[in-house]
Amino acid sequence: MDQSSLPAVAALPVYASPLVTRERFAELVGLPIGVVIGFANRGYIPTVSIGKYSLVNLELLRKRCLEREFPD
């Protein structure tokens, strides 16, 4: 089977860590950095502080999204 007959699969980002910077999170979700900073400051997205860095906790966000029920 040659490469041209294989189905196209979208490349998914690979995370080496469940923590990303606010800037990287903004890139991943397609929001302006100012919006992400506001979300983090208001506690809408989970963050963890390590030294002078504030990182978005992707695993906790994913878990919260899976636990939340959304209307059909």
Image: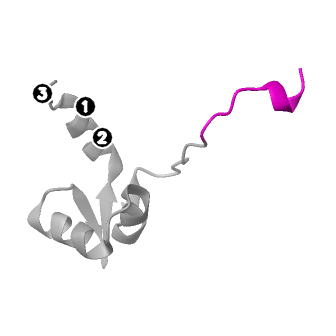
Q: Is mark 1 on a helix, strand or loop?
A: helix
- Front one among 56 and 33: 33
Q: What residue type is labelled 3?
A: Pro
Q: Do the residues labelled 2 and 1 touch (CB within 8 Å)?
A: yes
- Residue lying furthest right in this view? 2
Query: Are there few (<14), some (14-19), or many (20+) residues within 10 Å of tag 3?
Result: few
Q: What residue type is labelled 2?
A: Arg
Quadrant of the image for the N terminus?
top right
Q: Is residue 39 above or below residue 63?
A: below
Quadrant of the image for the C terminus?
top left
- Left/right of residue 7 with respect to residue 4 in the rendered view: left
Q: Which of marks 1 and 3 is nearer the N terminus?
A: 1
Q: Do the residues labelled 1 and 3 touch (CB within 8 Å)?
A: no
Q: Is mark 3 on a helix, strand or loop?
A: loop
Q: In this view, does 55 lie above or below 69?
A: below
Q: In this view, does 52 lie above or below 8?
A: below
Percent of width and height locating residue 6: 77, 26
Label 1 vs label 3, nearer the camera: 3
The numbered mark at residue 47 is: none
Q: Mark 1 points at which residue?
A: 66
Residue at 26% of width from left, 36% of height from top? 63
Q: Mark 3 points at which residue?
A: 71
Percent of width and height locating residue 48: 26, 61
Residue at 24% of width from left, 60% of height from top? 47
Q: Is mark 2 on a helix, strand or loop?
A: helix
Q: What stretch is highlighted in magenta?
A: 1-10
